Every structure is written in C-alpha cells, then in structure tokens.
C-alpha cells in the first residue's frame, strides 16, 4: 500500500489535511480582506474629496450667473408726462423674478429736468419694471425741491402716477414749520400731502 493510500484511509490524516487547507484559506483571507477594505476606503475618500473639490469649483460659476449692475440708471415717464430717473450704487436682478431689481443706495428723481424736481434717497430698494413701482427702505429722505424735507423708514413710490405713500412714522420740516405723523401720502406732484395717525405740527408765522 502506498503512502497516499495510507494517508487517505487514516481518519486522523484526513482531518489533518482538512485543517491544513482551512489554515491556508484563513491566511489568504487575512491578507485579502484588509487589502479589499483598504481599496474600498480609498474609493470612498476619493469620492468625497472629488465632490468637495467640484463643489468648490461650482460655487464661483453660480455667483457669476448673478446679474449685477454698477451705478445703473433707469429712466421712465409718469402718466402726466414727467420724466423720472432711478439711480443706485449697485443693482442686482432677482434670479427668480427677472422683473424685480434689488437696489443698493437708490436715488429717485421725479420731474427730471424740472426747475424743482423731487428727490428721494434710501439705503435699499426694490424696483419692479412691470408696474414701475419702487419700494424704498432704510433712512428714506425726501426733498420736494421747494424747501420741504421729509424723513421716514419706508416709502412706496408709484412712478407712473408720481404718488408716494409711507406706512411708517414721518418727520418733516420746511419754510412753514415742522410736522410728524404715523403714516403719510403725497399726491399731485407733491402739492398735496396727507398726514395720518398722531399728527403733530408746528407752524411758523411770517
């Protein structure tokens, strides 16, 4: 009987052979599994890094899509034929509403070219090109060109009609005295001013 036949016929020898095969398999797995895990981990890190880098690259492109104008001028004409001009330090067109323009430090001149135009300034504003409305906010200052000056925090201007309304406290002064009110409205090219809500006025006599 050959040595191989003796080995195959002996149960102990067969178990020893199986044990040796399992040992070799375990050694192989101990080498392969860590390497496979390292490859998977490297792939995940690479994917995260790539997404981070591409996200940084996309950010400037998104910023470039914003339409920003420096010292813009918008001209128009009201219903009575008076020309007006809206200027600003900068203007940004709204991404979601192309008819809406956000203004930085806007200036509105009503009655452009007239001897005494009305001028309004503010810290910020929103101008709609579809209905010619202008909303001003923050340190709103109005000069009617006739010596009267008004200050409030908000003003809504209809450049088509030339009417101005304000839902906030107004303080004004001019040649004939001073006035303060909770709300105000200005009509007829500034000839008619309506004050409402806790109106306090001081009139100066000539």
Image (cartoon, grey):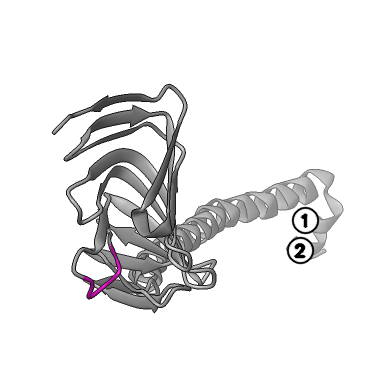
Q: Which residues are magenta?
A: 109-114
Q: Is residue 116 magenta?
A: no
Image height of 157 relative to 67, above or below: above
Q: Nearer the viewer, residue 91 or 111?
A: 111
Q: Secondary structure at mark 1?
A: helix
What's the mark number on residue 4? Answer: 2
Name the chief secondary structure element in magenta: loop
Left or right side of 16 for 201: left
Q: Please state, as top left, top right, bottom left or bottom right, where the C terminus lies in the image.
A: top left
Give the residue displayed 36% in from the left and 46% down from the top.
137
Q: Position of residue 126 (x, y in %)?
A: 41, 58
Please identify the quarter of the rendering in which residue 21 is found: bottom right
What's the mark number on residue 39? Answer: none
Left or right side of 164 for 10: right
For the residue carrying disc 2, how many other residues have a C-alpha within 10 Å: few (<14), some (14-19), or many (20+)?
few
Image height of 109 relative to 171, above or below: below
Q: Please state, as top left, top right, bottom left or bottom right, where the N terminus lies in the image.
A: bottom right
Give the residue displayed 46% in from the left and 38% down from the top.
167
Residue, far left: 206
Q: Secondary structure at mark 2?
A: helix
Please identify the quarter of the rendering in which residue 117 is found: bottom left
For the residue carrying disc 1, how many other residues have a C-alpha within 10 Å: few (<14), some (14-19), or many (20+)?
some
Q: Position of residue 125 (x, y in %)?
A: 36, 55
Q: Is residue 112 magenta?
A: yes
Image height of 153 relative to 190, above or below: above
- The number of discs equals 2
Mark 1 and mark 2 in contact (Cβ < 8 Å)? yes
- Residue position for label 1: 7
Instruction: Determine the CA span between mark 2 and mark 1.
Output: 5 Å
């Amino acid at each position: 009987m050959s040595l191989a036949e003796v080995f195959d016929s002996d149960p102990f020898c067969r178990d020893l052979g199986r044990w040796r095969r399992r040992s070799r398999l375990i050694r192989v797995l101990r080498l392969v599994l860590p390497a496979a895990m390292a490859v998977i981990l490297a792939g995940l890190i690479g994917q995260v890094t790539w997404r981070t880098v591409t996200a940084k690259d996309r950010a400037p492109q998104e910023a470039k899509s914003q339409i920003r104008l420096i010292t813009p001028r918008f001209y128009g004409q009201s219903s009575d034929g008076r020309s007006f001009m809206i200027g600003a330090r900068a203007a940004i067109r709204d991404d979601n509403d192309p008819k809406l323009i956000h203004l930085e430090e806007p200036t509105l001149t009503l009655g452009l070219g007239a001897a005494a135009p009305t001028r309004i300034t503010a810290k910020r504003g929103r101008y709609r090109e579809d209905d010619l409305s202008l909303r001003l906010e923050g340190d709103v200052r109005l000069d009617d060109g006739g010596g009267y000056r008004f200050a409030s925090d908000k003003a809504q201007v209809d450049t088509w009609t030339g009417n101005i309304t304000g839902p906030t406290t107004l303080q004004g002064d001019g040649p004939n005295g001073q006035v303060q009110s909770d709300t105000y409205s200005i009509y007829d090219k500034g000839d008619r001013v309506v004050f409402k809500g806790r109106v306090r006025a001081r009139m100066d006599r000539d």
